[in-house]
Amino acid sequence: MNIFLLYIFFAYLTLALQAIFFKGTKPDFVLVLVCIYSFKYGQARGTTYGALAGLLMDTASGFIIGPNIISKALAGLVTAKLKENIFQWNITVNTIVITLLSIMDVFVVYICFETFSKMSFHNRPWGISVMGIINTIIAALVLYPLFNREKDTGFIRK
């Protein structure tokens, strides 16, 4: 449970750092944290962490509650399922998974916003979303060593 609370703190911290240091398009550090947590602790815990991290994002945005809860919970679920089925996790697989999850995250959030808030993204330029995805991929590459930490550093490798 202590690790879970530490990761929740990291989610708060990453939201604060994103708000302070990034203007315009921002990397989704929370998505990367959800992937790392789900990779290390499995499907149920990863999905739960994703939902709570998404709740933090939705409450911080001040708009509607739900889009990030759904997208981050799905990211936790998919990461754990992929880890079970992929025999060797390396930087290439990590980058592909983060790319796909980041694209999925954008679409789920857009669909939720359009469905529940009547906010249309039909004419919105896709360059903003593409830059956000690229920034998230770069953040995942920088944070990739966290996927390979051993037991002595506080992370459990299964």
Image (spheres, rainbow, N blue to C red):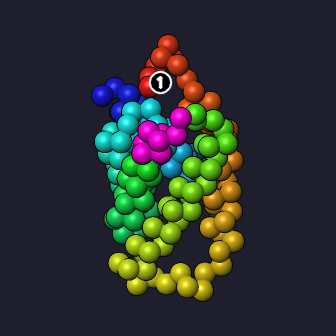
In which quadrant will I find the N terminus?
top left
Read off the magenta span. 79-87
Q: Is residue 58 visible?
A: no
In the displayed structure, does residue 81 sit left or right of residue 102? left
In which quadrant will I find the C terminus?
top left
Name the image quarter holding residue 17.
Answer: top right
Whether residue 81 is in magenta: the answer is yes
In the displayed structure, does residue 20 sit left or right of residue 45? right
In the rendered image of this protein, does residue 10 appear above or below residue 157?
below
Q: Residue at x 60, y 86 (%)?
A: 123
Judged by its main secondary structure, the magenta piece is helix
SS assignment at label 1: loop
Q: Residue at x 53, y 65 (%)?
A: 106
In the displayed structure, does residue 83 sit left or right of residue 59? right
Name the image quarter holding residue 7.
Answer: top left
In the rendered image of this protein, does residue 64 appear above or below residue 93?
below
Q: Residue at x 47, y 24 (%)?
A: 157
Mark 1: amino acid: Arg
Q: Residue at x 44, y 32 (%)?
A: 40
Q: Position of residue 45 (x, y in %)?
A: 33, 39
In the displayed structure, does residue 154 sit left or right of residue 131? left
Name the image quarter holding residue 119.
Answer: bottom left
In the rendered image of this protein, does residue 14 appear above or below residue 108?
above
Q: Which residue corresponds to mark 1?
A: 157
| Residue furthest top as drawn | 152
Q: Position of residue 90 (x, y in %)?
A: 63, 35
Q: Is residue 102 visible?
A: yes
Count of residue discs: 1
Q: Position of residue 137 (x, y in %)?
A: 65, 50
